[in-house]
Image: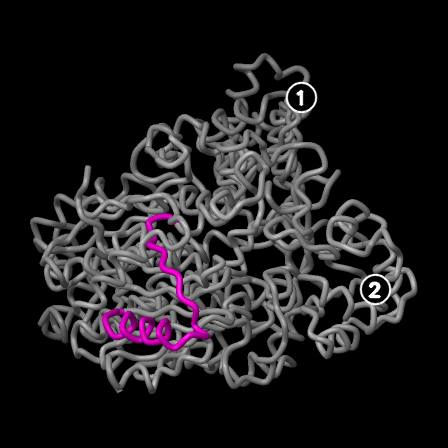
Amino acid sequence: MNQPGALEGLRVIELCDELGMFAGKLLADMGAEVIKVERPEGDPTRAYPPFLDDEPGLERSLYFWHYNTSKLSVTLDLTNSVDRKRLSTLIDGTDILIQSGEVGADLEYAVLQKTNAGLIMVTLSPFGQEMPRQEEAATDLTILAGGGPVWNCGYDDHSLPPVRGGGNQGYHTASHFAVMSALVALLYRDETDKGQHIEVNAHAAANVTTEAGTYTWLVAQETVERQTGRHAAVNPSMPVQVLCKDGRYVNTGIPPRRPDSFSAVCEWLETLGLTEEFLEFPLLEQGSKRARFDMSMLQQDQELMAIFGAGRSAMNFLASRLTAYEFFVGGQQRGFQTGIIYSPEEVLEDPHFIERGFPVEVEHPELARTFTYPGAPYQFHGTPWRIRRRAPLLGEDNGHVFAEAKHS
Amino acid sequence: MPGALSHLRICDFTGQLAGAGATRFLAAFGAQVIRIEDPVHQGQWDILRGMPPFVDARRGVEFGGPFNNHNVEKLGITLNLRTARGKELLKELVSISDVVTENFSAGVMGRLGFDYEALKTLRNDIIYVSNCGFGHSGPYKDFKTWGPIVQAVSGLTFSSGLPDQPPSGWGYSYMDHTGGYYMAIAILMALRHRNQTGEGQWVDLGCTEAGATLAGPAILDYTVNGRPLRRPGNPNSNRSQYPAMAPHGIYPSQEEDTWIAIACRDEQDWKAIGLATGESWMQEVRFSDLRGRLLAEDALDNLLAKWTRKQDNFEAAALLQKVGVPATAVQRPQERIDQDPNTKAWGLWPTVKHSEMGAIRVDGLPVHFSETDWRMEQGGPCLGEHNEEVFGGLLGLNPDEIASLTEDGVL
């Protein structure tokens, strides 16, 4: 139960706004001791909604709760020389320093390194330091809009604006790169004892997390266009999202394109007693008897085209006649890559994720309550991911962190 | 210059982007990533091998643009694991590797005879990281996915869209990229633990779970407050949820299908927008604080859109940035890749040399290291391109043996 995490013994100082805060969580939930440095009045994200029972309060932000699990909190007033000295002492005793935003922006690696040669410092910023656009103000929205993702997302109807994917993913991507980079530097330090400074550029991170939107331009100088619920593409593709009978959507995946998958669709329709209602059923049967499918001949082979089209219609028809969950599971059990479009909270109530232990219970002793959190992004069999404590109360760890720093 | 990870060797079965993206990152820092492909199917377990876009009229497994992008700096070998000799050679390779990576469907490695228990007998401290849609246990472990399905089931598709519309989802495989990032993180963390303790381990990465961790505040709003994200009028992901901001959105500009994103973080931004646009409605009392602007957000967005519609998106963004407001044109690929001074100055689009395709630009990395920066020079490997280097140089086979193994269909 209490096996150590993979990063046990690693110390991290976090001086981050929302851009880099997730990086600290990723390290802390794997066992690193992550000390979050807050200003005395508390980190501004403590004022971000949603709040426990919708009442704002320093210890009530669910945003703060999520992004700060397993971390320690100390408060420092960096305008005051005693506290600045305390910060220096903390940094001297740390392996990794992560910084983003205003607090700690004046810390210079060259200076810090003089007293901590092995220090790994990771600086996240919207555009990088000493870069042409470094002065520009940015938020998750503008990072994703200027960095490429937004151009790819939205609807077939281009009079609707393109869409920023939900959940502050621009910050997440920058944080993912911060963690990957810090760990690369750590492995290098394990070999050489040498620390280094790493810069993470959020706008660049969005740019290289945009798949075909980018390489279609790099390789062929062509521009992809957004489409409802599917990959942006140079040439439009067929819709894949279908409204099921319970009002939820599914993704019908890749339609049948092999004889055995046509047999599977036939069997599915037969099982549900829908063969007569689906008028193209004979085409599906034909598909199941065809020796082979050469998809490259689709445009030239009229019969193949008709069969392929019937397969696609059959999947859409089935989806419209079933609940989203029935379609998802029924399709997958027959070898189709079907998917239910869950809202995030529904994932925690699905039997698969429950059986894998994905929802985890986290105690909030001062509230005498326990809440369910999203769990491990990966299952480490030797050194399990674990939320070792709920997000820290403001300055909760001042006492022992400063006492320890004094004696070291 | 040796890279930060030059001391590491990865025996790599990954493909597509969800897996290949992970080892791509490590290869850029000098890890020796040996990509193993099946000669019988010409490596086409990875469908990207022959997939468009293409640089020219040539087609086939050596000409897939995305494959090249996702496999820069890796070595490529062929090995037929249906043969006893092929299995033996893989055993030799595993015994001198630090990490084994794959993103097959659950169970494939076991059927090949190389699950974690088997790998461990070959090298006791081996790190094995598997990455599949639903992980290796649970009722859906045999279900198949690709990016859009992972995004659908994990909540990411639902979370993206406009009210009264179906989900827009992500217009690409965001979770292939991000699944790869989690996979890279898992590999590196497991290596750190091995450095500290000498222990290897198996990491079972289920991409849908990784995706579901990316909606934390929405999930807690449900588990703590009982408020689901599936409720009327939601989501509207162009608006800001955390923190509240208004205006906050993507607005039309002058030319057809051109757009500008604007975020008003606070009262200072609001005043600045008023000054920059000179619009009189910005003085209206109902918009005088955040609460008022949130209550009248539809009206506010319509008024702001009337102004943006008359502007060029790049010019309007510059005007707003000048007064400190986060604003940007929604950049098209050409604009952000070829015309954005920042991506250019960063060196974000390095040119690699592919043995068949020649010089070709690829995604670089959004990080720079002061001591051991990344490097991308060599394109994705052609099929079996490094057979001599690996089977000869590393495993000590002589040229005749390699020739006869190739002849026999083992390589």
User: What residue is shown with label 1?
Assistant: A278
Q: Quadrant of residue B48?
A: bottom left
Tag shown at residue A248: none
- Asked whether B375 or A140 is in front, the reply is A140
Q: Amino acid at mark 1?
A: Phe
Q: Is residue B28 left or right of residue A303?
A: left
* Residue B365 in sight here: no
Identified at 50% across, 38% down, the residue is B219
Q: Secondary structure at mark 2?
A: loop
Q: Quadrant of residue B328?
A: bottom right
Region rendered in magenta: A69-95
Residue matched to label 2 = B256
Verify whether residue B252 appears in magenta: no
User: Left of B146 or right of it: where is B400?
Assistant: left
- Along the line of sight, the residue nearer the viewer: A339 or B346: B346
The quadrant in which residue A54 appears is top right
Q: Position of residue B155 (x, y in %)?
A: 53, 40
